[in-house]
């Protein structure tokens, strides 16, 4: 287990400071704002701490309201909306500087038998083992550029391997522009069997590449062309048990963008082709300067 994953697991171990009130912190690095996947994952941990162990989260709906400040803790308030015979609902708000920065509703469900089907088909793509790592792909794009050296040297908690182009590659080569984004990912360690932990880690990873999917459709990339963006809202549905320390194919697409917003959808498949998670996110995309790409 690398140091970044150890730190992430530590960040997910929230401090309980009162009944249904928890405190979370951010990594020591001081980025412009807190990573949205971190806030969503910590909020889900807070909700899970208030739910009986026989119920597992099956859906969440969240809004990113204000940028998070990585220099101070985040307070998570959990509201016990409903405790039914088979479903439990929680509402979570994340607070900094006395203001709500994030809100989430999460629903938990007991295990039940029922009708089942799967119409979604996993894309036919190369397996992850033969694909270059994220670090190798980034080195092929930026080389040993001094301004990127420290950032690229940092360990990452998630092993992500792109099937298609990175946004920076599509920006340089218009033939690589696409509205689809296919990424294998896993946490490269033997994780505990706690099902909620694997769901929380999938929620954390789900926010990494959805905005990239919208950028790919326009041949745009972070750090150039005056591009800025942020997650606005985020919804996930968890269909069946899975393990975040095994590979998951995150098949994403962007069906629409306009009015400084973009929509991205994703499906996470197990290596055997089972649909484990569905994701939808709307993001903000703004481009300043004279940019004519579309």
Image: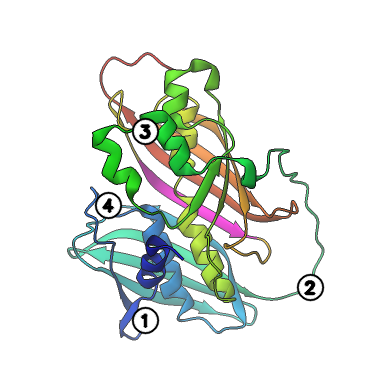
Label 1 to label 4: alpha-carbon separation: 22 Å
Q: Secondary structure at mark 3?
A: strand
Count the marks: how many?
4
Provide the residue designation for mark 4: 66
Label 1 to label 3: alpha-carbon separation: 35 Å
Residue 98's spot in the image, x, y percent?
19, 65
Question: Could one spot residue 259 in this view of the protein?
Answer: no
Callout 4 crowding tier (Cα within 10 Å): few <14, some 14–19, many ≥20? some
Label 3 to label 2: alpha-carbon separation: 42 Å
Callout 2 crowding tier (Cα within 10 Å): few <14, some 14–19, many ≥20? few
Tell me: residue 40, above or below residue 169: below
Q: Is 233 displayed left or right of 74 in the figure?
A: right
> Which residues make up the magenta segment?
230-238
Label 4 to label 2: alpha-carbon separation: 40 Å
What residue is at 55 percent from the left and 26 percent from the top? 178
Looking at the image, which is closer to me, 82 or 251?
251
Which of pointers 3 and 2 lies earlier in the amino acid sequence?
A: 2
């Amino acid at each position: 287990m690398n140091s970044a994953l150890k730190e992430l697991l530590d960040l997910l171990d929230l401090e309980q400071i009162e009944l249904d009130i928890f405190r979370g912190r951010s990594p020591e690095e001081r980025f412009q704002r807190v990573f949205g996947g971190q806030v969503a994952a910590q909020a889900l941990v807070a909700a899970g701490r208030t739910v009986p162990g026989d119920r597992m989260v099956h859906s969440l709906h969240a809004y990113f309201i204000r940028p998070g400040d990585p220099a101070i803790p985040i307070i998570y308030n959990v509201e016990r909306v409903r405790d039914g015979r088979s479903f439990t609902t929680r509402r979570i708000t994340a607070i900094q500087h006395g203001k709500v920065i994030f809100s989430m509703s999460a629903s938990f469900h007991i295990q039940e038998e029922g009708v089942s089907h799967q119409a979604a088909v996993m894309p036919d793509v190369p397996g992850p083992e033969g694909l270059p790592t994220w670090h190798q792909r980034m080195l092929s794009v930026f080389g040993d550029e001094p301004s990127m050296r420290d950032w690229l040297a940092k360990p990452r908690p998630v092993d992500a391997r792109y099937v298609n182009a990175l946004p920076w590659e599509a920006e340089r080569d218009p033939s690589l522009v696409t509205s689809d984004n296919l990424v294998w990912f896993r946490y490269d360690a033997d994780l505990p069997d706690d099902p909620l932990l694997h769901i929380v880690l999938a929620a954390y990873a789900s926010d990494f590449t959805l905005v990239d999917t919208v950028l790919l459709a326009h041949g745009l990339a972070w750090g150039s062309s005056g591009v800025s963006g942020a997650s606005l809202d985020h919804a996930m549905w968890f269909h069946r048990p899975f393990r975040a320390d095994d590979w998951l194919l995150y098949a994403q697409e962007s069906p629409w963008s306009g009015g400084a917003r973009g929509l991205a959808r994703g499906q996470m498949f197990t290596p055997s082709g089972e649909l484990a998670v569905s994701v939808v996110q709307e993001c903000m995309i703004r481009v300043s300067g004279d940019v004519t790409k579309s």
